[in-house]
Amino acid sequence: MRIKRLRLTGFKSFVDPAELHIEPGLTGVVGPNGCGKSNLLEALRWVMGETSAKSLRGAGMEDVIFAGTQARPARDFAEVSVLADGVEGDDVLEVVRRIERGAGSAYRINGRDVRAKDVALAFADAATGAHSPALVSQGRIGAIIAAKPAERRAMLEEAAGIAGLHVRRRDAEAKLRATEANLERIATLIGDQE
Ligand code: ATP
């Protein structure tokens, strides 16, 4: 999967609509302190389904919405869209996440309303996502060097594209447990009737 375009509106310091075209190869973001470099990377992680407000340097998820300045009023919503080549390379994937004050987040994939889980799976299958090792934020290199073996394994699995399989396995195991519980209940009911 190759990320081709990022669009932001009302996300953190990006109050006005902004569009970035990401060219093939390694992309670095440079600029003076406080110009919004980290906010850009956070926007990318957010649209890929980041659920931890803390990891986006906020207390709650609504903190990603432009909070206003002396010159401009706060916004009621933030929206980020990412355009990428699909897993096969030829199909196109457009994911949009929007958050409104008091209403939480909503996601769309190629114009269709989806759940957060569908977005996480779409990116996990493509070996990327909110926690992808391909997104190198400040302090990340040090964190990788200091990571425990289990954390390093998770990074390698993500890079190898099998993280999605773990999510599916957890889902399948939960369904299996629920089905086993139902079977036990049925067996008890049958036993009661005999
Ligand atoms: P540095 O190089 O110092 O790490 P940076 O370029 O990574 O800086 P960011 O941390 O991305 O900069 O941006 C910080 C700016 O974003 C600050 O000016 C902060 O006030 C602004 N900002 C963060 N969240 C919001 C928000 N919800 N609303 C408005 N502005 C915000």
Image (cartoon, helix red, strand yellow):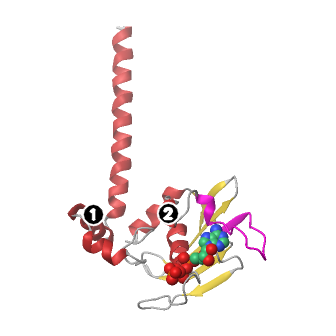
Assess whether residue 124 is covered by the magenta stretch.
no
92 to the left or right of 65: left
- Of residues 183 and 83, the one drawn nearer to the viewer in this rendering: 83
Looking at the image, residue 149 lies above or below residue 190:
below
Query: Residue at point 68% right, 69% down?
Result: 66
The residue tagged with tag 2: helix, strand or loop?
loop
* Count of numbered badges drawn on the protein: 2
Query: Residue at point 26% right, 70% down?
Result: 146
Looking at the image, residue 47 lies above or below residue 34:
above
- Of residues 69 and 86, the one drawn nearer to the viewer in this rendering: 69
- Of residues 180 and 132, the one drawn nearer to the viewer in this rendering: 132
Q: Quadrant of residue 136?
A: bottom left
Q: Amino acid at mark 1?
A: Glu
Q: For marks 1 and 2, give the CA distance.
A: 18 Å
Question: Going by the picture, which residue comes out furthest to the left?
Answer: 149
Q: Is residue 67 visible?
A: yes
Q: Amino acid at mark 2?
A: Glu
Ligand 1: which quarter? bottom right
53 to the left or right of 80: left
Decide: marks 1, 2 in contact (CB < 8 A)?
Answer: no
Q: Is residue 11 visible?
A: no
Looking at the image, residue 95 lies above or below residue 166:
below
Please state the extent of the stretch shown in magenta in the rendering: 61-79
Q: Quadrant of residue 168?
A: bottom left
Callout 1 crowding tier (Cα within 10 Å): few <14, some 14–19, many ≥20: few
Q: Position of residue 25 (x, y in %)?
A: 41, 91
- Which mark is first along the chain, 2 or 1? 2
Q: Position of residue 167 (x, y in %)?
A: 37, 55
**Residue named by callout 1:** 151
